[in-house]
Amino acid sequence: MNFKKEIDIAKYEFHKWRKTLIITDIIISLAVIILLAFIRPDYLVIAVFFLAIPYIILTQRKVVLYHFLIAALVAFVWMIIANNQYSYNQDFLKIAGINLFPLFAWAIGLFSMYIIYSYLEHLLKERGFIKKIVLFCIIFFPILIIMETFGYHTLNIHNLAASQFEGLPICNCLHAPHWMQFAYFAMGPIFFTICYLLKLENPHFKAKSSKKKRM
């Protein structure tokens, strides 16, 4: 006698607006970078942070609101730890003694790195944690250095509290004690690991259940 067994197979398909979202996200990101030269950086990152929420909802990516929240929490914890290490050559806003520019810049930065990663995750043939975090770091490390270099040399954003320390070689950016430099590079993997452990989903894949019959 033959027995038929139904098996649920998880198939994944891209978000229906994926191509449009890629273009839109790139345009918005470039616009924000350009506006940094014309609008006070602290005002801009705060505005981008709060405008990101309706943008996420309108683009039907509500699942990444969890990533957004984790990015904000990681940035907040970092500022509790290292707030005394920030004193800029520009008069940025503060609340309860916490400098708002690095707080919101880190929150937006970490979240943006995940969005970039979310578009590229499908390139991984196997989606184990090690390969995922390696891909994330390949994205995060260079962009971190590029943005730190851009902020220091082009936008003239200097952290006077750490100006006596040497910056990274070649780019001459990220002037800070070694533990702080290490923390900058560690924050990305820490953020990604938390999202992974919480099993947060990639917004650009939708699980589609199908049935397969086996004799």
Image: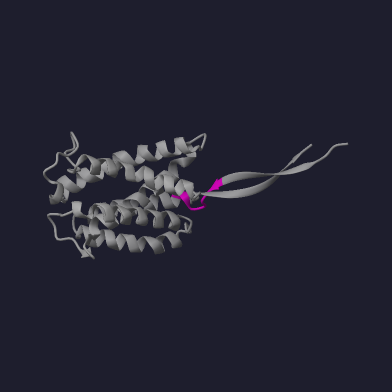
Query: Total marks drawn?
Result: 0
Quarter of the figure with residue 7:
top right
Q: Please say if 7 is above or below 77.
A: above
The structure residue drawn at horizontal position 19% and vertical position 54%, both measured from the top left corner, is 84
Image-based side of 9 in relation to 30, left or right: right
* Residue 10 among magenta residues: no
Q: Which percent across, then down, holds residue 210?
A: 67, 47
- Residue nearer the viewer, 58 or 176: 176
Quarter of the figure with residue 107:
bottom left
Report if residue 156 is visible in the image.
no
Image-based side of 103 in relation to 123, left or right: left
Q: Which percent across, then down, holds residue 10?
A: 62, 45
Outermost residue, front side: 81
The structure residue drawn at horizontal position 48% and vertical position 53%, both measured from the top left corner, is 17
Q: Which percent across, then down, holds residue 145?
A: 25, 41
Q: What stretch is highlighted in magenta?
A: 13-19
Report if residue 174 is visible in the image.
yes
Q: Which percent across, then down, holds residue 78?
A: 29, 52
Quadrant of the snapshot with the C terminus: top right
The structure residue drawn at horizontal position 37% and vertical position 60%, both measured from the top left corner, is 52
